[in-house]
Amino acid sequence: MQSSPSDILLLAKQPHEARILASLLRQSSYSVASTSSEAQALAQITRKPPFLIILTGDYHTWSQTLLGELRTYANMHRITLVALTDFHAPRWMHQEENPGFDGFLVYPLSSEVLSSLVQSAHTRQAVCATV
């Protein structure tokens, strides 16, 4: 399995939100990039699209423009796009209100759930590339 500099991208408005998640993800064979800047995230995706993007914290704090651009890139490059929220503040929504995420996760995550997410996202991209 070949890794690239941007296999997984974490977007976190507060950098501490991504530290534990990044350390868990780094236990896999994939590289992890982390940013709190919307501009840096888009530059990273444009330069080398990851197979998985995880937005942490309240996704309402991210701009609608960013979410729209992420969904566009995700569709073009078969990127799995998920939002991660804290257990004390999950916000469930109707599917028609979904701003374009492929899924939602609640923190704290077990390493098994995280590993399953990573493998599913990687497999999704690999399978879609051959179709």
Image (cartoon, grey):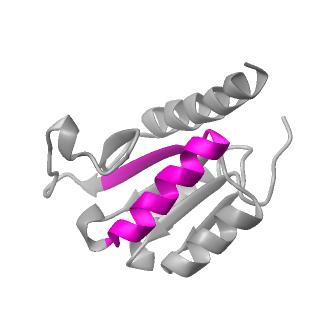
Residue at (70% x, 22% y) in the render: 127
Magenta stretch contains residue 75? yes
In the picture, residue 31 is in which quadrant?
Answer: bottom right
* Residue 81 percent coordinates (x, y): 47, 47
Residue at (36% x, 52% y) in the render: 83
Residue at (66% x, 73% y) in the render: 43
Q: Which of the pair 4/129 is nearer the observer?
A: 129
Magenta stretch contains residue 109? no
- Residue 79 in view here: no
* Residue 78 percent coordinates (x, y): 62, 38
The number of numbered discs placed on residues in the rendered structure image is: 0
Left/right placement of residue 101 relative to residue 18 reads left
Quarter of the figure that contains the N terminus: top right
Question: Main structural element of the magenta stretch: helix, strand or loop?
Answer: helix
- Residue 105 in view here: yes
Q: Is residue 122 above or below residue 54?
A: above
Residue at (61% x, 28% y) in the render: 124
Q: Is residue 25 above or below residue 62?
A: above
Q: Is residue 125 above or below residue 88?
A: above
Q: Which of the pair 90/19 is nearer the observer?
A: 90
Q: Which residues are magenta?
A: 62-84
- Name of the residue lying farthest toward the right: 2
* Residue 6 percent coordinates (x, y): 72, 58
Q: Which of the pair 42/1 is nearer the observer?
A: 42
In the picture, residue 67 is in which quadrant?
Answer: bottom left
Quarter of the figure that contains the C terminus: top right
- Name of the residue lying farthest toward the top: 131
* Residue 21 percent coordinates (x, y): 48, 57
